[in-house]
Amino acid sequence: MKIARLVLGVICLALLTGTVAAGADGADQLYEFKMKGQDWTDIVGEKYVWFSKKKGRELYDARTGEQIWKHKELPGYDGNFALNWEDRFLLYSTKKGVARLDIPTGEVAWSKELSNLKFKDVDRYWETDYGAVFQIKNNFMLLDPETGEEKWSLPVEPSSKLAKEGIPWFHDLGDRLLIMAKDGPTLIDPSSGTVLYTVKDKYNKKIDEPVISLGDKALFFFDKGLRVVDLNSGEETFAIEGKVEETTSLKAIEVGGKTYIFFGFNKQLIAFDGETGQKVWQTAEGSVEGSVRWVGSAPGSDNVLIITLRADKFGGDAGT
């Protein structure tokens, strides 16, 4: 018989109040739990202590030690995957889908079957304005955690190369979701699950992140070109074909109260409006000697740029 003594109770009390009752041995026992074979113990929401044993859960008041509820087995739980959602409820896998158990009451709010995915295979999840997005192997699903409604699911294989390099491949853009997939970016409308934009291309390896946000536009860097995509319509607004030589020069500068984004591309300099994502200007191809390493505004000037080139030469007036 295993006993979880007041050591746990004291720890819980200390976490909640910042104080510990002292006794002869430095702490007074408040209560004890007599358990057998529990798998793990955790503190939930600074209010509760719960124990897990195989498919079961027991919840206790962290201050008094009083048992609030007990499930020898969570109703319908297949024993594979369980997720504590914000200390409010537990989402767990069932034989045919997913169920929600509310933590304060121990009651099952809903249990739903999934159309073609298995909740036990969840790899990652994200909370969005439209619900909970789950990656289940090479698929993505949007689930309403309040009602259990499966809003949509679609097959998208994330880029394992970006993941291994620690580069973000999932982007929550509010009204849009962007997944940097294996074969190229996929832009999704989270309200419907509609794919607004996708293109097969190889990401550029010379830049820290192959995508940057330009207001309501997204700029993608590929191995042999770049593309600017309107996030609202999913349409390309600008594209340049050609190998990106030096994307490390990417730089955002505020000039005259506006933000511009500059970068070197094939021995030329290109400027974008940082708010609209529209191209403002670009120098002629081959007009910049050497690849651009750094761009900065000249002191006291709104129409002159200082450019550091890889060949250690400097440029002056770049035009506006």
Image (tube, helix red, strand yellow):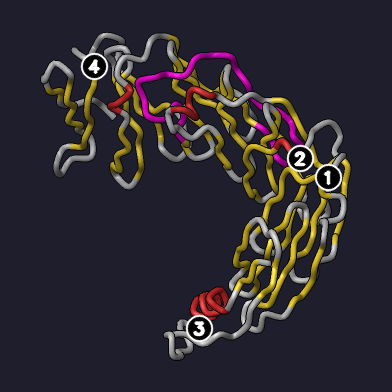
Marks 4, 3: nearer the viewer: 3
Residue identifier under label 2: 119
Q: Earlier in the sequence, mark 2 or mark 4?
A: 2
* Element on which disc 1 rests: strand
Q: Earlier in the sequence, mark 1 or mark 4?
A: 1
**Count of labels in the image:** 4
Q: In the depicted view, which residue is nearer to us: 267 or 247?
A: 247
Residue drawn at (30%, 43%) of the image: 254
Say which amino acid is labelled 4.
Ser
Marks 2, 1: nearer the viewer: 1
Q: In the depicted view, which residue is nearer to us: 178 or 147?
A: 147
Q: Which of marks 4 and 3 is nearer the N terminus?
A: 3
* Element on which disc 3 rests: helix
Residue interval drawn in magenta: 188-212
Say which amino acid is labelled 2.
Phe
Residue identifier under label 3: 17
Measure the C-alpha gap from mark 2 to mark 1. Answer: 8 Å
* Element on which disc 4 rests: loop
Per the rendering, the mark at residue 291 is 4
* Element on which disc 2 rests: helix
Say which amino acid is labelled 1.
Thr
Q: Do the residues labelled 2 and 4 touch (CB within 8 Å)?
A: no
Residue drawn at (67%, 80%) of the image: 65
Measure the C-alpha gap from mark 2 to mark 3. Answer: 38 Å
Please give left or right for residue 11 compared with residue 85 in the image. Answer: left
Quadrant housing residue 296: top left
Q: In the depicted view, which residue is nearer to us: 110 or 140?
A: 110
Q: Earlier in the sequence, mark 2 or mark 1?
A: 1
Query: Where residue 282 appears, x then y in whole percent?
Result: 34, 20
Residue identifier under label 1: 94
Query: Where residue 96 appears, x then y in whole percent?
Result: 87, 39
Q: Which of marks 2 and 3 is nearer the N terminus?
A: 3
